[in-house]
Image (tube, rainbow, N blue to C red):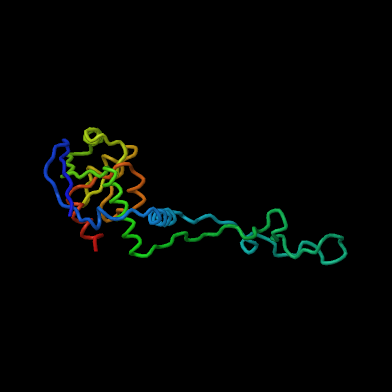
Amino acid sequence: MSTLTVYDISHQKVREIELNDRVFDAKVNPSLFYDSVRSHLASRRKGTAATKNRALVRGGGAKPWRQKGSGRARAGTRRSPLWRGGGTVFGPMPRDYSFSLPKKAKRAALWAALSLKRQEEKLILLDAFPLEGFKTRRVLEILKKFEVENALIVTDDKHTFLERSARNIPGIEVLRYGSLNVYDILNHEHLILLSPAVEKIEGVFAS
């Protein structure tokens, strides 16, 4: 077990807590990051692109002209892909792009991402983030004390004031510990964890 300092919102040391080395001191494997981020982004794709094939194009029920004698090529429908306005061949159709990684790989990638932030000294532990209302300016003042402009803030539970106060700040995102993922950790320069969230993260992801 190793220790890390916990601060209050005034950037004053409050105490030190022990961190689970399995979660916060794991081996950093870039290939796990690649697979995890690719899986995350693939699951966000809507997959709604669609074209009409010859079965979906309107019309074409009647044969355009007789089979022989007109001097033109044989044609049985106006929906043929050879015709303007006809169906599309092998065009995109609605599909699901998502794919899942093995449970052990997802867990190892998350451990590695958390460990990387700690190794880079970009991991900040806060005792709490109290707000008395929807105050974006107050959130900015607190972050400025830690010299943070781009960060992912992870909470232990629903923090309505914090979530709504921070959502209009570019580069700042608030997530609950259950939604923690590798992509959002790596996509932000700093990782700010509320101390109650640390316990829950270790409880959920350490096994």
The residue shown at (70%, 61%) is 80
In the image, residue 8 sits, relative to residue 54, either above or below, namely: above
Nearer the observer, 174 or 11: 11
Query: How far across and down, in percent of the image, does residue 37 sit?
Result: 40, 53
Between residues 67 and 50, which one lies in front from this camera angle?
50
Give the residue at x 67% y 60%: 59
Residue visible at 35% across and 62% down?
A: 105
Please state, as top left, top right, bottom left or bottom right, where the C terminus lies in the image. bottom left
Q: Is residue 41 left or right of residue 117?
A: right
Q: Where the N terminus falls, by quadrant? A: bottom left
Residue in view at x 23 percent, y 46 percent? 160
Q: Quadrant of residue 35?
A: bottom left
The residue furthest bottom is 67
Total marks drawn? Answer: 0
- Residue 162 lies in quadrant: top left
Drawn side of residue 95 relative to residue 191, left or right: right
Q: Position of residue 135 (x, y in %)?
A: 23, 36
Q: Is residue 54 left or right of residue 142?
A: right
Above or below for 89 versus 187: below
Which of these two is toward me, 4 or 54?
Answer: 4
* Front residue of 83 and 20: 20
Q: Position of residue 200 (x, y in %)?
A: 20, 56
